[in-house]
Image (cartoon, grey):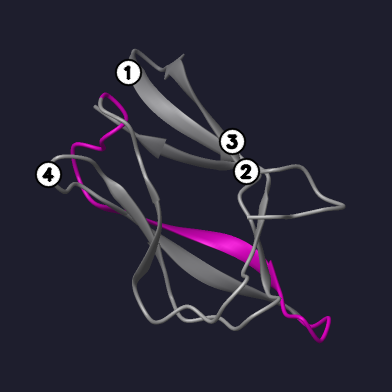
Amino acid sequence: LPSAPFAPPRYRLECEGGGRVVRLSGTIKLLSPSGASEAFWNAPAGYTPTYNQHLTVATKTAAGTSGQNVINCINAAPYSQLLINAMTTGDLFFLDGITFVLD
């Protein structure tokens, strides 16, 4: 999804505190409205959290209003899915600083 002028979405696996975490960064701009709990990324094998986790992200509407939303990191087979609550076309959500624990 285009996110200019912000960095594109990306992820990386890191070791932290004796365990593994996935760190997300970048920005996603919605090209069409999203429904409640709609998937926006299917994590590859090895990036699945052991337990479901809920994380707050910063948002900005197409009209320029700042806010927050929730990403749900789901332990689902065969891969985890990150889900987001309903938003509309042109809205942005920012992944910078989002980290979820794998084990």
Residue 22 colored in magenta in the image: no
In this view, 73 is above or below 36: above
Q: Nearer the viewer, residue 26 or 97?
A: 26
Where residue 19 appears, x then y in whole percent? 32, 18
In this view, 75 is above or below 103: below
Q: Nearer the viewer, residue 71 or 62?
A: 62
Mark 3: few/some/many CA within 10 Å (<14, 14-19, 20+): few
Q: Amino acid at mark 4?
A: Ala
Residue labelled with disc 4 = 77
Q: Amino acid at mark 3?
A: Arg
Q: Residue at x 32, y 30 (%)?
A: 47
Q: Amino acid at mark 2?
A: Pro
Mark 1 vs 3, N-terminal side: 3
Q: Residue at x 34, y 34 (%)?
A: 101
Callout 1 secondary element: strand
Q: Nearer the viewer, residue 100 or 29?
A: 29
Quarter occupied by residue 51:
top left
Left or right of 41: which side holds 60? Answer: right
Q: Which residues are magenta?
A: 46-65
